[in-house]
Structure formats: structure tokens, C-alpha cells
Amino acid sequence: MPTADQRYDAAIELQQQGKLDEAIAALTALIADEPGFMLGYAALSVFHSKSGRHDEAVAEAKKVCELDPDDPFSFMALSLVCQRAGRLPEAEQALGTAMEKQWAARQSQ
């Protein structure tokens, strides 16, 4: 059986071949089997956003933030997805959280 990383790579390859729906299906199956595989949620968020499924994109981006709550980049990505979805208050809140996380990371160095 392929590893989670191999399955992720295969899904990315599908997307690069223009098979976005197949890539989404592959990533959905991957995270069903590996619910802690953060990269799967991150890619799924991007792919849902590209396909106009904004609510799903936001949900997946929020899951990334749950899995890695100290990563400023995850909250920045959530902010961008929320902006694309027209959810501006959520986008602003996620951006603020990203800035707070970045500041905290700098202070701990």
C-alpha cells in the first residue's frame, strides 16, 4: 500500500494534469485514511478554492490551523481562502491571528 506521502504526490500529479476533480477525490480519500495528514488538507483547500467550492476550501483551511495552531502561514492561507470566499470578517480575523503567531515566533527566538 502506498504511503501517505506517495498518495499526496499522486494527487498533486493529477491536479497538474488538469484532473482537478480526481485530485480532490484522491485527497479526500487520503485524509479519510490519515486524518492528521496536514498537507492533504492544505492542498484540498487550494483545490476546492480553485474549483469554486469556497465553503469546503475554508473548512479544510481551518482544519490545517487546528492541526498546527502555532503556524502563522496556516492562518495566512486561511485568510486568503476566506477572502476568495467573500468572508471578509473571517479573513481579517485569520490575518490578525497570523500576525500574532508571527510576532510570537519572533519573540521566542
Image: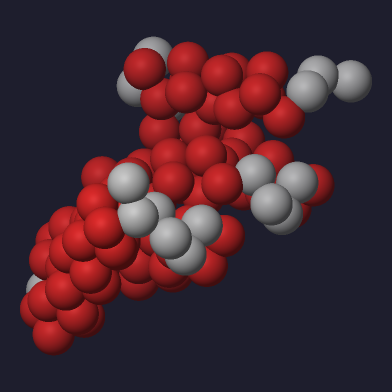
**Residue for point 26% across, 45% down:** 50
Which residue is nearer to you in this view: 84 or 109?
Answer: 109
Residue 53 makes an appearance in the image: no
Q: Is residue 44 above or below residue 97?
A: above
Q: Is residue 89 above or below residue 26?
A: below
Left-right relation of 52 to 108: left
**Residue for point 68% across, 18% down:** 6
Which residue is nearer to you in this view: 21 or 37?
Answer: 37
Name the quadrant containing residue 11: top right
Q: Is residue 53 above or below residue 13?
A: below
Residue 64 makes an appearance in the image: yes
Left-right relation of 87 to 63: left
Q: Is residue 72 above or below residue 13?
A: below
Name the quadrant containing residue 84: bottom left
Q: Tell me the quadrant of the picture where the N terminus can be found.
A: top right
Which residue is nearer to you in this view: 99 or 28?
Answer: 99
**Residue for point 29% across, 63% down:** 104
**Residue for point 52% across, 67% down:** 66
| x then y, percent, for residue 92 | 12, 76
Left-right relation of 41 to 17: right
Q: Residue furthest right?
A: 1
